[in-house]
Amino acid sequence: MHPNQTVQRRRRLAKGQMPFAVVFSCIDSRVPPEIVFDRGLGDLFATRTGAQTADAVALGSVEFGPDETGTPLIFVLGHEACGAVTAAIESIRTNTPAPGHVQAVVDALRPAYDIAVGQSGDMVDNMVRAQTKLTVAQRKNEPGLAEKIKAGRLMIVGGRYSLTTGRVELIA
């Protein structure tokens, strides 16, 4: 439907924004949150990192919506065939450091790897799911966010986007 993409919408938003969700997702070019969820200008705060790994800047960006504008939803979005996850698996399995700062992404994905390696099935998909669930759990345990959840002002959930079907499955 491509909502909220008009010149009039853009002009109204020049005065301020009130997105209804923060989407914390991967940098993958095939998974832009505004297109995945068919949203327009001013609908979403989007924070994107490799396999939704988080450092202090990314965390601050995710927390901005709930803290500053009262955004009531954080959605952590993993996806099928994640290149960052695939690269991390290769780096960890071969004990070969990733180039430059990409190693920071690999290091951040290590807990998800440790969960996924013990599971049957597709390692990449298991790790995507593990990373999404871990990220949701970590955000729920952030003191400021946990307080908002307890007060009923915030929900944090996770999902997995299928590149082949275009559907998002709730997983956390």
Image (spheres, grey):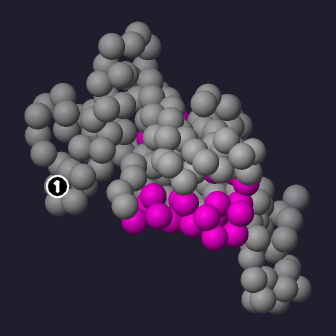
> Can residue 83 be seen by looking at this rendering?
yes
How many numbered marks have been drawn onto this rendered protein structure?
1
User: Percent x, y for residue 160?
Assistant: 59, 36
Crowding near pointer 1: few (<14 within 10 Å), some, many (20+)? few
Magenta stretch, residue numbers = 57-82
**In the picture provided, is 117 more to the left or to the right than 136?**
left
Question: Is 64 part of what is drawn in magenta?
Answer: yes
The vertical placement of 169 against 44, above or below, is above
**In the picture provided, is 154 more to the left or to the right than 47?**
right
Question: Looking at the image, which is closer to me, 50 or 134?
Answer: 134
The vertical placement of 138 against 23, above or below, is above
> Can residue 162 be seen by looking at this rendering?
no
User: Percent x, y for residue 4?
Assistant: 84, 71
Question: Looking at the image, which is closer to me, 110 or 162?
Answer: 110
Q: Which residue was labeled with disc 1?
A: 99
Q: In which quarter of the image is the N terminus?
A: bottom right
The vertical placement of 156 against 120, above or below, is below
**In the picture provided, is 160 more to the left or to the right than 14?**
left
